[in-house]
Image (spheres, grey):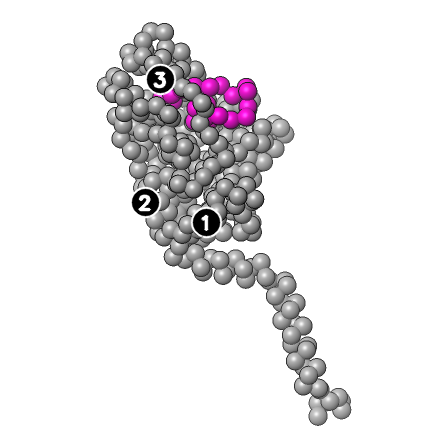
Amino acid sequence: MSPMGIRLSPLGVIIFCLLGLGVIYHLYSGVIANRIASFRQAKTVDLRELLALSVEAAVLGGQEVKRIREENALHEKSKGKTREGAKEMLTTGDLFSHRKMFNLIRNTFPNLQVNSEEHDDASVHETSVWNHVIPEDIRNTISESREVPTESITVWIDPLDATQEYTEDLRQYVTTMVCVAVDGVPVIGVIHKPFSAYTAWALVDGGSNIKARTSYNEKSPQIIVSRSHAGKVKAFAQKAFGNDTVIIPAGGAGYKVLSLLDIPDEKHEKADVYIHVTYIKKWDICAGTALLKALGGHMTTLKGEEIDYAGSEANEGGLVASINMNHKALVDKLPNM
């Protein structure tokens, strides 16, 4: 008999314990589910899940980019200079987007190698974790899971592509991007335009929500290039395609890749080829490479070499990107840099 003369019923004790377990499960079910998911992905990751996570990360980062631009709270500063001597800008939009994107991916899949353009030394950390719900459009397009070894994956994120244009309020050029490479080969690409809420995504050999245009001018292509050195590329391109070659100066590598594709934005410029002749970072171009690759296109160095998206962040060999063209013949026309 218990103290105070109260007799405890064995059945009552069992019911009380079950109720307690139910309350604990309800309070911590999310944590438990994520721990289980984390344990399960210790050795492999489902690329379809990683695509869905990448889309959510790009959109969440884009929301921060848009909010800060609309609040005019950029607080821009120079974080150094490019090799061409131009200022490399950093804004609050870059940092807040980085926090959302980097921490969402890292918190959900702690074992992944994640490389971001920005590095946040502040003590502010996002605690959000992806809910593992795959959106309907991805489920309808990609019906099967595909597991790959965790150790083979490198994630590249660009929290704000076209920062210079962002500071100039040239919003059309701004994107957020996520790319997943497996053994150095891009297989997932996401490019999100925060100010029009448009997101292009693709899984190589799986499916995409974007397609190529119906035609391209291979003989006299319109070539899209960086605003910062359009003159240098114009001279380079004219040697290959003639003095009448049309050059389209634009900001942001993500914007330039989308200009080669069929997107629902009449204001987005259309080009046939994307050329970059100087040093560029891999988080700028990995997502675009994956999108083009999924649609049968190519992004290579100016010599036609495939770019390895593992290891170093640097691509020293310039780039040329095309789709529905003879890419090798295109490369062969380019002058020796």
Kind of residue at badge 3: Glu
Sequence-wise, the earlier of marks 2 and 1 is 1
Q: Which residue lies furthest to the top in this view?
A: 243
- Label 2 sits on residue: 183
Secondary element under disc 3, as helix, strand or loop, is loop
In the rendered image, is residue 206 in sight? yes
Location of the C terminus by quadrant is top left
Residue 284 quadrant: top left
- Label 3 sits on residue: 218
> Closer to the camera, 133 or 313?
133
- Label 1 sits on residue: 144
Q: How crowded is mark 1: few (under 14 residues within 10 Å), some or many (20 or more)?
A: few
- Residue 88, position as x, y percentages in the image: 43, 27
Secondary element under disc 2, as helix, strand or loop, is loop
- Residue 249, position as x, y percentages in the image: 43, 16
Relative vertical location of residue 263 with respect to residue 109 in this rendering, above or below: above
Sequence-wise, the earlier of marks 1 and 3 is 1
Kind of residue at badge 1: Glu
Q: How crowded is mark 3: few (under 14 residues within 10 Å), some or many (20 or more)?
A: some
Kind of residue at badge 2: Asp
Residue 258 part of the magenta-drawn span? yes
The structure residue drawn at horizontal position 40% and vertical position 35%, both measured from the top left corner, is 294
Say the numbered circle drawn on residue 112. none
Secondary element under disc 1, as helix, strand or loop, is loop
Instruction: Tell me where the magenta segment starts and ends, as one range.
Output: 255-276
The structure residue drawn at horizontal position 31% and vertical position 9%, both measured from the top left corner, is 242
